[in-house]
Amino acid sequence: MSELTVSSTAQRRDDGRVVITTRLTGDQGELPEVWMALPPRARLDDLTPVDLGNVSLAVGMLTAMRQGTALRLEQPASRTLLASMPQYQTVFTTWYPELLQRVEVRAEAGVDERPRGAGEATFFTAGVDSFDTLLQNRATITALVYVAGFDVPLTRPDALDRTRRHLEAVAEAAQVELLEVESSIRTLFDAVGSWGLMMHGAALATVALALAPLGIGTVRIPSGKSYAQIDPWGSQPLIDPLWSTDAVSVVHDGADAPRTGKIARIAHEPLVHEHLRVCWEQFDMDNCGRCIKCSRTRLLFEAVDVGHLLRTFPGTISLESMLDEGFRGANDVFNARLVAAALQRNPRTRPYGDLLADRVRYVARRYPLHVGEALPPRDLRHRLALRLALRRARRLQQAHPLPDRAGTTG
């Protein structure tokens, strides 16, 4: 079997930050190198060969499996981490048998003699999942980790500055450290496979493993889905803990609750009202207020009577995106059913919940989907049903408008 050789080196760049650079070379040519700038307080002397080997393994594992080549590491990697990789490969090749192959990992098993640090960090983007993890573990978390280049590209310093202001305010209020990381890893991983379905968990693991020299002994990855939604995804309860070593424990956090449950847990926290960010349009604004993610989030907060308190969303809360864009696949139907139930529990929002529940029943009856499946292209019958649902929504919103951000009705 041909090989993909991966090597990581560390050096200090001109601004004083420690940068780990990972190079990948194989029979199919040299891939784009990956770099990761560690938080400013990281020290070059604290990085061991095993730390660098762990980073190489996290960067190279799925890349080698996608190419179908053996993975050779030029530095030793944690023996605990190496022992977990057969199970990691079993899960991913079961999920994606046509895309990934089991491969041999050729690496020296190293021992990290560093004691596990007392610090506990969580990845944090100011979204619902990361706020839930922070607030549920407030007594033990000592740091928030944000990676520039993952959700917001490094080419958008304006968007990164706006994001940073929110993160700094949350960290100060919660009395925890903000650990800022920069990385180009998404450039490589987007070329290897789907960021959401396959790659983002390994990217987060790469960062988690690099934080061990900073005294971080536990890193939490906020869940994007609950145990009721277990399906192939890049970050999952089945796979995230497999990235743990003797020096750092990687924890998949928050899968005990669906999005409705998480929002109920964080809904009355003022920090959430001031800094919540969920939108796909966040390169240009905090939240657009209109897309499916914004609409779903605002409706769930309004179901517990606080949607109008969210300061990072403009305009009036609307149901229309949920009825239209909110039905693209099986996962959307699952989420819409939860949103409808949450709205129906509140007498004030029950008419919105009833209308959404009608839409869920129509879609579920016409398109009995399995987990992960997408809805087929809309035929004439579906388009007419959607038009009717949207007309009902506009009449409802005129007769019983939900509050806008200022707390007044539109």
Image (cartoon, rainbow, N blue to C red):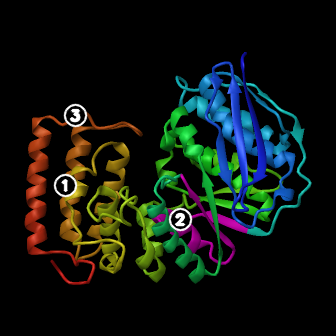
Residue 274 placed where, x, y %?
42, 78
Residue picked out by circle 3:
377
Q: Which mark is residue 130?
A: 2
Q: Amino acid at mark 2?
A: Ser
User: Considering only vertical position in the picture, is 192 above or below 261?
Assistant: above
Q: Is residue 340 left or right of residue 118?
A: left
Disc 2 packing (10 Å; few <14; some 14–19; many ≥20): many
Few, some or many residues within 10 Å of mark 3 (<14, 14–19, 20+): few
Extreme-front residue of the structure: 14
The quadrant of the image that shows the C terminus is bottom left
CA separation in Å, label 2 and label 3: 34 Å
Left or right of residue 295, residue 246 in this image = right
Q: Identify the residue at horizontal 86%, vertical 57% (top origin).
A: 45
The quarter of the picture where residue 214 lies is bottom right
Locate the N terminus by quadrant. Answer: top right
Residue 358: assigned label: 1
Q: Which mark is residue 199?
A: none
Q: Residue furthest top?
A: 1
First of labels 2, 3 by sequence position: 2
Query: In the rendered view, would you say 157 is above or below 118?
Result: above
Say which of 406 and 160 sits in front.
160
Q: What is the distance, in whole Å, between disc 1 and disc 2 at their CAs?
A: 31 Å
Indicate the secondary structure of the residue bearing disc 1: helix
Residue range (magenta): 120-149
